[in-house]
Amino acid sequence: MNATLVRFRFGDDFDEKRVRALAESSRATFEDMPGLRSKAYAIDAVNREAVNFFLWSNEEAARSFFSPQVLGRFGELYGVAPTLEFAEVIQLVENRR
């Protein structure tokens, strides 16, 4: 399993309402996406960042999703270029009820 952390670092133009609206409007795009186990949308208002956390079934799915076209589209939507961090998930705790 692999994780991808996608950060959008804003300057003084950080707009939390806009970031929340983007999360809401894009949620359906990722539902039932092949290879994607889960995705979390987060806001770090102190550091003026939007953070998306993806869990993928494998590294190939993780890396193949983030094509130059997808990264360009993310940049257009958020108004800033994203940074990516990839990591292997070595253990996962899920507390589902």
Image: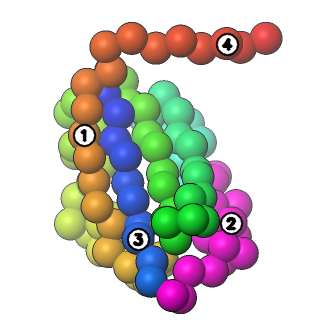
Q: Quadrant of residue 86?
A: top left
Q: Which residue is mark 1?
A: 86
Q: Earlier in the sequence, mark 4 or mark 1?
A: 1
- Who's the residue at 46% across and 43% down the image? 53
15 drawn magenta: yes
Which of pointers 4 and 2 lies earlier in the amino acid sequence? 2
Q: Amino acid at mark 4?
A: Asn
Q: Which mark is residue 95?
A: 4
Indicate how the structure is coloured in the image: rainbow
Residue hosting label 3: 9
The residue type indicated by label 1 comes to: Phe
Classify mark 3: helix, strand or loop. strand
Q: Which disc is residue 53 wearing?
A: none
Q: Is residue 95 magenta?
A: no
**Which amino acid is tagged 3?**
Arg
Query: Percent x, y for residue 94?
Result: 59, 14
Disc 4, SS: loop
Q: Could you give the CA–CA distance between mark 4 and mark 1, rounded to whole angstroms?
A: 24 Å
Which one is earlier in the sequence, the residue at label 2 or at label 1? 2
Mark 2–mark 3 contact, CB under 8 Å? no
Please report whichever mark, 2 or 3, sits nearer to the chain's N-terminal start: 3
How far is the residue under mark 3 from the one under mark 4?
Answer: 30 Å
Residue name at image x 51 percent, y 87 percent: 12
Amino acid type assigned to the residue bearing label 2 in the image: Arg
Of the residues tagged 3 and 4, which is closer to the observer?
3
| 45 with respect to 11 (left or right) | right
The rendered magenta stretch, by its main secondary structure, is classed as helix
The residue that mark 2 highlights is 20
Q: Which residues are magenta?
A: 12-28
Q: Secondary structure at mark 2?
A: helix
